[in-house]
Amino acid sequence: MRLSILVALLLALVAIRHAEAADPLPFERGSWARLRASHAGEPTVIHFWGLTCGPCLVELPHWGKLLAERPDLRLVLVAADPLPQDPERVATTLRGAGLDGRESWSFIDRFYERLRYEIDPAWAGELPRTVMIDRDGKATVLPGVADLNRVRAWLDAQPKSTHQE
Amino acid sequence: MRRVLLGLGLLLLLGGSAVAQHHGGGSAEAFTATPAFGPDGALWLARAMKDRIVVVKSADLGRTFGPPVAVTPEPMTLDWGPDARPHIVVDAGGNPIVTFAIFQDQRFNGRAFSARSTDQGASFSKPQPLTANTTSQRFETVAIDPAGRVFAVWLDKRNVAAARTKGQDYPGAALGYAWSDNGGGSFGDTSIALDNTCECCRLGVAFAGPGRPAIVFRNIFEGSIRDHAVVTFKDATTPGPLRRVSVDDWKLEACPHHGPSLAVAPDGSYHVAWFTDGAARKGLFYARADSADAAFSAPRALSSPDRQPARPYLLANGKAMHLVWKEFDGTKVEVRWQASHDSGRTWSEVRTVAATADASDHPLLVAHGNRAYLSWLTKAEGYRLIALEDQP
């Protein structure tokens, strides 16, 4: 019992630290499990984008607007470029889209197959891609540019009270 | 137990920041090796390094290599796109010709160059642009036709710029090409074979005969459908009609960085392998056509989509047709191989010819005489040239 509280505390610490970092967190082998664990039990929207993906750069500011509109949106950003990108450019691009200060990760491992496989074996790597995970861990995938009305509807369907201790 | 957990937590906290510092700054790095055999059986590789291209030569089928010879005298921002690589061909006199592209800016506009050696690879000429137009060229490919004439083809954005000044929309890029009449020392006037191709997938080039290039590429069909097509030239300056390889119905407003491969067999048959994530089918596929004018067969799936099949490559070598691609099993990337001895109608059982547990370049095929080889650069093992059996 006390152990689980300790684990939760540690994971919360990790999450806070992540949220404050200006540079993206390095997304490497095992990161997906860490990311999932740190948001377990909380409805979370994970948006995969890339500096090398034109439509992603057009879409990003819309996520910035949605975030301003919906305080209940727990958004995590993952730059999933096939080749590791300059973290400063990742951070600058997010800031420009109004996504500064959000939990942000960036692929840093050239073993791209492995990173994608950990996330979803059937994901061929196309971007953008949005994964919405509810409090029970059920994932809904929106491939391509996301219809934000679907994201709003999904948020509306999530139970409001998130802590069950 | 508690101490272990605390330690783990600290590792998570500290580990993250340490790695973050290490990967700071700098741009993405190219990691490719492109092979070609010389007439004497020497193996040549064009290697894209951090900011330059070098050529190395092996007289013992890739076991040992001579010292690297610089192709690019100055440091350059090479095109590091995941489907980009320098290309190399070796002419009948044993002289290599190398083509490559650089990024001109941070918006992925490229500039393509060629460099040639006239002293059998001891040195290279100063790289010359493939074309005078400076808008953008990427995914250049160089090939020598059956008569020995050097041909280059690339994705060119000059017509995008032209359309924009007229306030018109122009999806994708164009297929630009040029011939060299001095053995690759320089290239003649550029022509546009076709407009509105996908803009960041590699091209596949083969020849239907002297002066008759055949090119496979990801096209943009009506409605932003990014499926594959082949164009065969009627003569050196007349591109033939566009032939669709398959209706995969992949509607996409982006570029998948995942181009096709083409081989033309001695019997004139066409063979194409490609990746799609379309509504009609998803994964890697192969199809054949009896001739340049015949329709393509129904696509045959290679592997299953949950094994991340990727980067197919075809090679016709005499009566043998070889096909390789990458697959991932959750731990290892494997290069899978099939061969056909009846013009692609039936294929051998799929076999794994090499594997790695870290990052890797695309698998490529190259042949000398009767022997075909897998050419593969991997982070853990380095460069490997692996002989394929003739009769799998």
Image (cartoon, coloured by chain):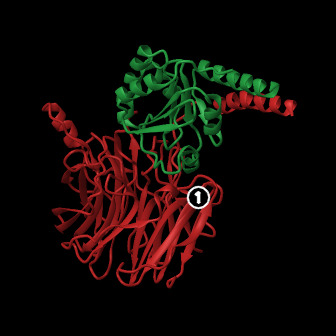
Residue sitting at 20 percent across and 40 percent down?
B170
Residue marked by disc 1: B329
Regarding residue B300, the answer to whether it shows in the image is: yes
Which residue appears farthest toward the left when viewing the image?
Answer: B166
Name the image quarter holding residue A162. top right
Residue B295 on image: x %, y %: 21, 71
Tint applied to chain A in the drawing: green
Chain hosting mark 1: B
Q: Residue B11 versus residue A165: which sits nearer the camera?
A: A165
**Marker count (numbered):** 1
Residue B48 on image: x %, y %: 50, 52
- Image: A50 above or below B143: above
- Image: B218 above or below A107: below
- Drawn side of residue A32 relative to residue B53, left or right: right
Residue B211 on image: x %, y %: 22, 70
Regarding residue B153, the answer to whether it shows in the image is: no
Q: Residue A42 versus residue B338: which sits nearer the camera?
A: A42
Residue sitting at 25 percent across and 46 percent down?
B173
Name the image quarter holding residue B333. bottom right
- Drawn side of residue A79 relative to residue B229, left or right: right
Q: Residue B205 versus residue B2: which sits nearer the camera?
A: B2
- Image: B351 above or below A72: below
Dot 1 alpha-carbon crowd within 10 angstroms: few under 14, some 14 to 19, many 20 or more: some
Q: Amino acid at mark 1?
A: Asp
> What letter labels the chain drawn in red?
B
Quadrant in which the N terminus of chain B is drawn: top right
- Drawn side of residue A120 relative to residue B2, left or right: left
Residue A62 on image: x %, y %: 37, 23
SS at circle 1? loop
